[in-house]
Image (cartoon, rainbow, N blue to C red):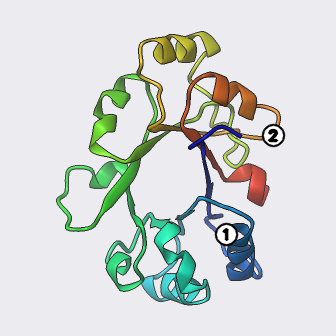
Amino acid sequence: MVDNFKIIIISNPKPIIDEPIIITNLFNNGLDLFHLRKPFNSITETEKLLENIPKQYHNRIVIHQHYQLTEHYNLKGIHIKNNDKNSTTDHNIISTSFHSINELSNKNNYQYVFLSPIFNSISKDGYNSQFTLEELKIAQKQGIIDSKIIALGGINVNNVKTIIGLGFGGVAVLGYIWGK
């Protein structure tokens, strides 16, 4: 692919059979980062999942809830949700999600940010792109879309070249990997 182009996989929000094995295999095959997003999991369920992923990969996991687990499991950091952006935290904030070009003016507060949905979502019915290709090209020319911006939403093998051409720093994939 392109140097420093990130491939991030976001967990299915629901439990998956053999999930720790699948996640481990993804890392074994070169996965850069894994976003653990299990909004329905208790802290105990999240801990059980983490305990079944080899420790050598924990520093490549970003967690979306139960932020207190970050230090105990030596996780890369947290993905802060919209409703948590104004709260203070001692945890290592890595990323957040934005849904408009204008919001990207705050991108420098993070290591990287998700911009979504770039294409119509695979995993969320009716969650359609709010961006035209022309808008994205203009944002790239203005330096708004750069290596800190990760494309999310409707990503598949057929549109990754478009994402690269638009100057995104990587892709985050959920629906294409886990299916509906």
At 35% from the left and 29% from the top, the residue drawn is: 103
Q: Is residue 39 visible?
A: no
At 75% from the left and 60% from the top, the residue drawn is: 178
Above or below, 110 against 92 in this view is: above
Mark 2 is surrounded, within 10 Å at the Cα level, by few (under 14), some (14 to 19) or many (20 or more) other residues, namely few
Say whether residue 55 is left or right of residue 94: right
| Quadrant in which residue 53 is drawn | bottom right
Pointer 2 residue: 157
First along the sequence among labels 1 and 2: 1
Q: In what quadrant of the picture does the C terminus appear?
A: bottom right
Frontmost residue, 27 versus 91: 27
Frontmost residue, 180 versus 62: 62
| Quadrant in which residue 27 is drawn | bottom right
The Cα atoms of the two marked residues, 1 and 2, are separated by 19 Å
At 33% from the left and 79% from the top, the residue drawn is: 71
- Residue flagged by tag 1: what amino acid is it? Phe
Query: Most extreme residue toward the front, as rendered?
Result: 3
Pointer 1 residue: 27
Query: Most extreme residue toward the right, as rendered?
Result: 158
- Residue flagged by tag 2: what amino acid is it? Val
Q: x%, y% of residue 78?
A: 38, 63
Q: In what quadrant of the picture does the N terminus appear?
A: top right
Q: Is residue 83 visible?
A: yes
